[in-house]
Amino acid sequence: MCGRFSLTGNTEQLARYFHFQYVGNIEPRFNIAPSQNVLTIVENRGERVGKMMKWGLVPYWADDPKIGFKMINARAETVDEKASFKHAFKKRRCLILADGFYEWKKEGNKKIPHRFTLKSERPFAFAGLWEKWDKHGDSMYTCTIITTKANELVKEVHERMPVILPKEWEEVWLDPAIDDTEYLKSLLRPYPAEEMKMYRVSTAVNSAKNDVEECVKPINSR
C-alpha cells in the first residue's frame, strides 16, 4: 500500500517539470497523509491542469463521503473490476505528484520508517484516479493512488508499492480518449528497482502531525 508520501518542490519547479498550469502557490510537504489535500494533474481540453484533491476516493454514487477513508489505494490487479474504481479507471485518471514515499519495516516489536525516492531525486507521478462527489449540498474532488506488487528494493520493507509512471507514459495515462483497460493495466508495473533508492528516516514521520523537513532526512543512508 501507500499511506504516506512527500512533495517538497515549489510551484515553479513542479510546473516546469510536469508542464501544467496551476493557480496558486504549492508549499513543500514532507509527510502527506490520507484525507489531506494532494496535488494532482488532470487533462482538461488537451491542457494539463494542476488541481488539489482530497486523498481518499469517494465514488460519485456513494451516499457517505466517509467511504473515502478506505479508498486511499486501488490495487492494479483489480482496478478495472471494483465498482469503486472501474468507472474512474476508464475516464478519470490523474497524476499524483510526489518525490518520495514511506513504508515501515517490522523489526521485533518496532516499525522502522523508510523513505523511497528515485536515484535522480527528481519528482515523479503516481498513477491515480479521481472523482467528483456532489451530494447533499456538498461537492468535493477526491483521488486514490494505484498500487502494484513491490519491486526488489521495496520488497525488503513491504510487499506492495505505489505505481510510479515513467515520464513517457504520463501523457497516455492522462488521455481520456484511451479506454482500453488491458492496455492501461499493462502500464501498472513496479518501477525498476535499479532506478530507486531507499533509506531509513526519523520516527517523526509516524505522526501525520509532523509535516517537517526532519521526516525526509536520512538516517544510515544506503
Image: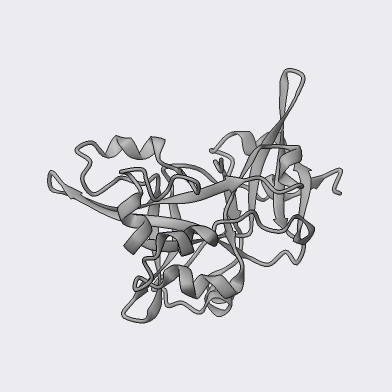
Residue 4 on image: x %, y %: 57, 44
Left or right relative to 136: residue 58: right
Q: Which of 115 and 71 is in front in this view?
A: 71
Q: In which quarter of the image is the N terminus?
A: top right
**Residue furthest to the top:** 109
Indicate whether 52 appears above or below 169: above
Q: Position of residue 147 (x, y in %)?
A: 54, 47
Q: Quadrant of residue 78?
A: top left
The vertical placement of 162 against 16, above or below, is above
State whether residue 30 appears in this view: no
Q: Which residue is drawn at 56% across and 43% down?
A: 2
Q: Where is residue 50 in the image (x, y as percent from the top left)?
A: 42, 69
Q: Which sits in the foreground, 114 or 191?
A: 191
Residue nearest the viewer, comparing 182 with 139: 182
Task: Reply above or below: 183 against 102.
Answer: below
Q: Residue at the far left: name it.
A: 136
**Residue 38 shows up from this direction:** yes
Q: Is residue 9 above or below residue 154?
A: below
Q: Which residue is drawn at 45% across and 59% down?
A: 182
